Amino acid sequence: MPELPEVETIKTAIEKSIGKTNIIKVSINNKNLREKIPDDLATKVQGAGIIRYRRRAKYIIISLDNGLSLIWHLGMSGRVKISESMPPLVKHDHIVIETGNGVIVYNDARRFGLFTYCSTENLEQHRFFCKMGIEPFDENLTPAYLAEKLKNKKVPIKIALLDQNIITGIGNIYASEALYLAGILPDRTAASLSAGECGKLIESVISVLKQAIAAGGSTLKDYQKPDGSLGYFQNMHCVYNKTGQKCPHCNCNVNRTGGIRKTVLGGRSTFFCPVRQK
């Protein structure tokens, strides 16, 4: 599934390529995604002008000058393609948005994505967003905030990092990488983190996400940027999917330690260094 850096990369690519222009036509070739696309979506947004793009957690939000906002989630395997003119459509091209500056196509083989709309003024009250926690880059994400959220959490810190009610947008890859950078074992009880460790973890989350965004995200399976190129942050992963390898910051004997280890927490593969992380 595209995580925050991948969604941010896609949002920025659409914003740079399409920009603030009018939506000429929306064609829905398959309404049956994770949730059915509203029957009136195309008529609601046709002719409206795009005035703002933003990301909330793993959602892309496109605000229009008619008081509505499009809400877009890419699901497990959703891809966005951008072209100057109408491209030849292929299998699983479910949504086509024609604008004054080009065409956006949404392809989703597994149909786990989501495409809908709501009133812009009611976005924060929408059921997708009303219970969401703070964004990783929000200045209000402080050690005190995180310590307060974790103080009664008996779950492993890795699971707490994936809780969108605490911090939004952190996915499985970047949770493992951030915990490695912070030197914190993923199976530590969340409530056991000190205020100092909370501060270090926040710094690590921000650092990892910024690096990943700069690298265009991580391409592991289906993810591609809208221009068809691949992200390359997977080449910078320290622990994710590197079982048995030596972590880049250790001088330990891999034959003795076994190198980077894999465990499963909350049903998700988790990778860590047993020497560096405590």
Image (spheres, rainbow, N blue to C red):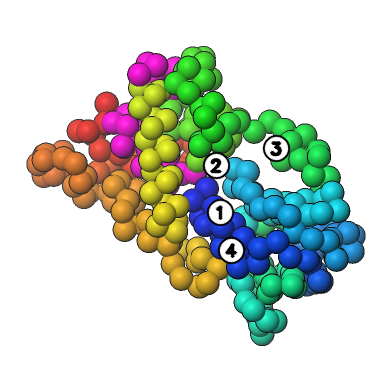
Whether residue 193 is in magenta: the answer is: yes
Question: Which SS class for mark 4?
Answer: helix
- Residue at label 2? 169
Q: Residues within 10 Å of mark 3 (few under 14, many from 20)?
A: some
Q: Nearer the viewer, mark 2 or mark 4?
A: 4
The magenta segment? 171-196
State the image coordinates of residue 63 (x, y, percent, origin top left). 75, 52
The answer to whether 98 is drawn above or below residue 203 in the figure is below
Whether residue 162 is in magenta: the answer is: no
In primary-sequence order, the first of circles 1 and 2 is 1
Question: Which SS class for mark 1?
Answer: helix
Residue type at tag 4: Lys
**Left or right side of 91 for 182:** left
Count of numbered circles in the view: 4
In three-dimensional space, the C-alpha distance between marks 1 and 2, rounded to whole angstroms, equals 9 Å
Q: Residues within 10 Å of mark 2 (few under 14, many from 20)?
A: many
- At horizontal 35% and vertical 22% (from top left) the residue drawn is 197
Q: Nearer the viewer, mark 4 or mark 3?
A: 4
State the image coordinates of residue 248 (x, y, percent, origin top left). 20, 46
The answer to whether 191 is drawn above or below residue 167 in the figure is above
The reply to whether the C-beta atoms of the residues labelled 1 and 2 are less than 8 Å apart is yes
The reply to whether the C-beta atoms of the residues labelled 1 and 4 are less than 8 Å apart is no
In three-dimensional space, the C-alpha distance between marks 3 and 2, rounded to whole angstroms, equals 12 Å
Residue type at tag 3: Phe
- Residue at label 1? 7
In primary-sequence order, the first of circles 2 and 4 is 4
Residue type at tag 2: Gly
